[in-house]
Image: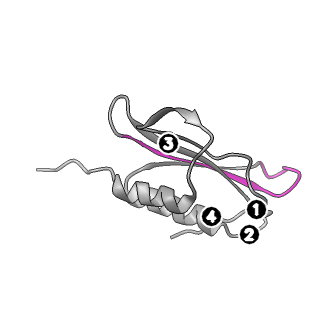
Amino acid sequence: MKTATAPKRKALPAATDLIDCARANGWSVEEQWTPPNYKGAPVLRVIVGRRMSETDVFLYRLIFRTDGTKPRAWRARTPRNHKWHDVAPRPTKIREVIATNPVRKAATS
């Protein structure tokens, strides 16, 4: 388990736990840090998601700030709400959704 760490070496355990849970359950993960020359505290942008069917998808777009300030909004798309909305749940709740909806591996013969 590699801890998500900012360039200034501040650990982001909530981001690390979410990323590890998503990968362990077969979900797609995209991570993007602010550029090295960024003025201010580094920021980690994370998208985790998986397609349930052609029309149903779970996507969560979150921003983790290394200075401890709260992000403006975390966004989500879910099978119940197909459009992006500004009410993504906390990372602990997202981990519960991920664990409940793992990607099933195709059987090999």
The stretch drawn in magenta includes residue 39: yes
Q: Position of residue 20 (x, y in %)?
A: 48, 63
Mark closer to the observer (3, 1): 3
The residue mark sitting in front, 3 or 4, is 3
Does residue 80 sit above or below 68 in this rendering?
above
Q: Marks 2 and 3, how far apart in space?
A: 26 Å
Q: What residue is at 34 percent from the left and 29 percent from the top?
A: 54
Q: Residue at x 45, y 56 (%)?
A: 22
Q: Earlier in the sequence, mark 2 or mark 3?
A: 2
* Of residues 81 and 49, the one drawn nearer to the viewer in this rendering: 81
Q: How far apart, in angstroms, are the residues tagged by discs 4 and 1? A: 11 Å
Q: Measure how far apart labels 2 and 1 are at the Cα level.
A: 6 Å
What residue is disc 3 on?
59
State the image quarter where residue 61 is shown: top right
- Kindly indicate whether the residue at mark 1 contacts the one at mark 3 (C-beta within 8 angstroms): no
Q: Nearer the viewer, residue 88 or 38?
A: 88
Please name the residue shown 56% across and 34% down the image: 84
Alpha carbons under labels 2 and 4: distance apart: 9 Å
Instruction: List the residue tagged with mark 2.
Output: 10
Q: Which residue is mark 1?
A: 66
**Residue 20 shows in this picture:** yes
Q: CA distance from mark 3 to mark 4?
A: 20 Å
| Residue identified by numbered label 4 | 4
Query: Could you say whether the residue bearing mark 1 is in a helix, strand or loop?
Result: loop
Badge 1 amino acid: Thr
Which comes sooner in the sequence, label 3 or label 4?
A: 4
**Which region is colored magenta?**
35-51
Proximity of marks 4 and 1: CB atoms separated by less than 8 Å = no
> Is 74 within the magenta?
no
Q: Secondary structure at mark 2?
A: loop
The x and y percentages for residue 6 are: 72, 62
Q: Amino acid at mark 3?
A: Leu
